[in-house]
Amino acid sequence: MGSLAGKKIAIIIERDFQDLEAWFPYLRLQEEGAVVEFVAPEKKEYAGKFGYPAMAERALRQVKPDDYDCLVIPGGFAPDFLRRYPPCIEFVRDAYAKGKLIASICHGPWILVSAGILKGKRATCFAAIAVDIQNAGAHYEDSEVVTDGRIITSRKPEDLPAFCRAIIKALGVRGQGSGVSKRKA
């Protein structure tokens, strides 16, 4: 068993997600023993920004924060579509309120901005949206990964190894055992 056995993780996708930022965590977190699912507006296949497909196992309207220990939000163009989809914003906001780990990379922090969970937090993102997270009240850091409480952010695909290590470390610290963790950090 891996260090994340018993943990359940949702990776939120939409059309034109950044292929590596979705698939690298999907495979790496599975390798650690987690159950990982793609979640999207509809239960169907989505094409990544570079054409690589991913099948959403569940629709956002069907999921609840208590179904997961962690949400991962890849970048690409998908966050620009997702931030206009109220069930996505509500899901992320509610998951954060329930003490879940939220990890976001590249343009993914746009979802955190829309969910209103970045105020007073340290965070990073793709440089083009740094002003957006600052305007949301976050303290921007140009680092490969930034962890502030239950929020983990990274900048770009090259940061994926550090991003996944931070997720694995945070979920490992959040308690051992099986089942979805209900503890708050």
Image (spheres, helix red, strand yellow):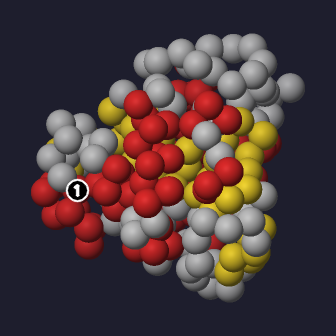
Q: Position of residue 131 (x, y in %)?
A: 16, 64
Left or right of residue 153, residue 120 in this image:
left
Between 107 and 100, the one lying in front of the other is 100
Considering the image in quadrants, where does the C terminus appear? top left
Residue 129 higher or lower than 90, as above or below: below
Left or right of residue 152, residue 125 in this image:
left
Residue wearing tag 1: 133
Q: Residue at left 75%, top 22%?
A: 179
Q: Is residue 119 visible?
A: yes
Q: Residue at left 44%, top 49%?
A: 90
Could you tell me which secondary element the residue under label 1 belongs to? Answer: helix
Between 141 and 136, the one lying in front of the other is 136
Left or right of residue 117, residue 32 in this image:
right
Q: Position of residue 96 (x, y in %)?
A: 43, 35
Which residue type carries mark 1? Ile
Q: Position of residue 155 (x, y in %)?
A: 38, 59
